[in-house]
Amino acid sequence: MTKTTVVPIKLESSHRTTLQEQIYSSIRCSILEGLIGADHRLPSTRALAAELGVSRTTVMGALEHLQAEGYLVTRRGSGTYIAKQLPDRAAPLPLQHARGGRHPLLSERGRALAEARAPDRRRPVSPRAFRLGTPALDLFPLRLWSRIARQCIRSATAKHLDYSALSGLMPLRVAIAEQLRSRGTKCEPSQVTVVAGSQRGLDLVFHLLLDPGDSAWVEEPGYPGARCALLAAGAHALPMSVDADGMRLSEEPDADNVRLAYVTPSHQFPLGVTMSLERRRELLQWARRSRTWIVEDDYDCEFRYQTQPRPCLHALDPDGRVIYVGSFSKNLFPALRLGFLIVPHDLATGFATARRASDMHPPVLEQLVLAEFISRGHYQRHLRRMQAAYSERLDALQTAIQRSGVPLKLRPVHSGLHAVADVEDGIDAERVAQEAEARDLEVVPLSHYYYGTRAPENALLLGFGAIRPAAIRLGVSHLAQALDAARRN
Ligand SMILES: Cc1ncc(COP(=O)(O)O)c(C=O)c1O
C-alpha cells in the first residue's frame, strides 16, 4: 500500500507572498529537490489544512495549481499523488508578481488565471506544418474582404460611431440565424448574441450560468479555453473521460453542485470523435434529470470528410437547456474575433444586459463587414471552396504518412482541421514534439490537453488546415527525422 508522505512546509505570515503561494512553492521545491518522490501520496487537504492551521480552500488552491502544472495527479477514491512523470517543460512560473514592485498582489483567481499553463498555439509567425487550430489563411479572399470593408467604412455615418446594440447588429444576427439551419437546428434572430469570438462567449455563459464554487463537467482530454473560462467564473472543472462515442456519462463524479456540462459533440476537441446520437440523448436526459445546462461548442463543424453531419445537440433539445456556441475563427479567420451564442428566448435580454459588465458589444465595423460578406453569398462560397481544399490537405497528410512508413498511426478523420496520430514503437510523443520543434515543425502532444486525472494517450495532434499539400509532404519527411531522433534518445 502507498504510504502517505510527509511534506516539509514552513509558513510565515510576514512573508510577502500569500499562504497559498507558500504552500505551492514548498511542495513544488520539495518535489524538484527530490525530498518527496514520484508516486508518493500527499496527506488529505483536510489533514494538511489542520496541520498548517490554514483553511482547506487555501490548501486546495495550492494543490489545484500544482495539479494543473502536472506535478500532482489525483486518483479517484485514493488521493493526490506526486506525478510519476514531472513536467520537465514547465518553466518556473512567476508567482511573486510583486517582487520589486510596490503594488499589491493579484487576487487568487487572477493569479490562477495568469499562471494557468496552456499549450501555446497562438504564434505570430506564419503557419508551419502542422499548426493546430488555424484554417487555410492562404486561401482566404482577403482582397474581397478588404473591398467590402472599404465600402462599409465609406457608407458609415455618425450613428455607426456610437454605442451599438448589445446583442450585436440585427442584419448579422438574421444572417447567423439563417446559417444555423445548416446545423439542423433553428432559432430566431432575437436569440442570437454576437460575441468577440467563442472564447468571449464561453466567458459570458459561464459567468451567467454559474456561481463561484459551482462545478461543470468538461471533457478530458479537452479544450483549455473552456477550462480557463470556468476558472475565471470561479467554477471547478470536473474532467470526464471521452471514448469513441464522445464524453462518457457512466462515471458521474461525486459532486452535488454540478450545474453545467461543456461539450464539443460535433468534433470533440482534441480527439476529433463525434458524439453518438445515443450519447447525445443520454446527456440531454441527464441534464433534464439534474436540472443542469449543456454548453455545446460547435467550433469547427462545417468541414466533413465522407460522413454526414449529425444534428447538433441544440436541435435535439426540447427544453432550452442547450446554449449553442459558434465561432467564425475556423470558417473565416481567427483574427476576426467574432462568434455567437444561441440562448433561450427568455434569457436573451438578460444576456444582452449583462454585457454591460464587460465588452458591451463587439466592434461594429467587423460586424458590418461580416454581415455583408454573408448576405452577398460569399460565406457559403468560401465554405464550399474550403471543404475541397481541406479534403485535399487531409489526403496529402494521410498519403504522406502512409508512404513514409513512419511509426505513426492516423486515427480516422471525419471532420475538422486536425488529425490525431498515435505514436508507435514505444517512442514518447512529448519527445517527438520537442524534436519536431527543433526542426521548425509545430506538433502538439495530445498529453497537453489532459487535466492530470487520467493517463494521457501517447499521440500527436497534426493540424492540416493551414498547410499546403507540398508543405505537408515536406513536413512529414521532417517529422520522420524527429521520430528517429526521439527513438534514439
Ligand atoms: C474547442 C474550441 N472551441 C472554440 C474555439 C475557437 O475559439 P474562438 O472563437 O474564441 O477563436 C477553438 C479554437 O481553437 C476550439 O478549439
Image: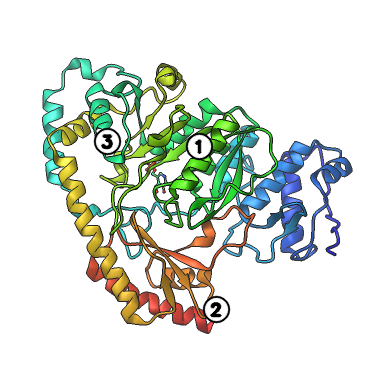
Q: Viewer-nearest of labels 1 and 2?
A: 1
Residue 319 position within the rendered picture, expressed as x and y whole percent measured from the top left: 46, 27
Q: Quadrant of the C terminus?
A: bottom right
Label placed on residue 168: none
Label placed on residue 284: 1
Task: Name the residue rendered at 53%, 27% in the picture.
Answer: 209
Q: Is residue 199 visible?
A: yes
Task: Name the residue rendered at 44%, 79% in the picture.
Answer: 407
Residue 181 position within the rendered picture, expressed as x and y whole percent measured from the top left: 27, 35
Give the side of residue 215 with respect to residue 132, left or right.
Answer: right
Q: Between 269 and 333, which is closer to the camera in this rendering? A: 269
On screen, residue 126 above or below 402: above
Quarter of the render that holds ligand 1:
top left
Q: CA distance from mark 1 to mark 3?
A: 21 Å
On screen, residue 453 above or below 105: below
Mark 2 residue element = loop
Mark 1 residue element = helix
Tag 2: amino acid: Gly
Tag 3: amino acid: Arg
Q: Is residue 19 visible?
A: no
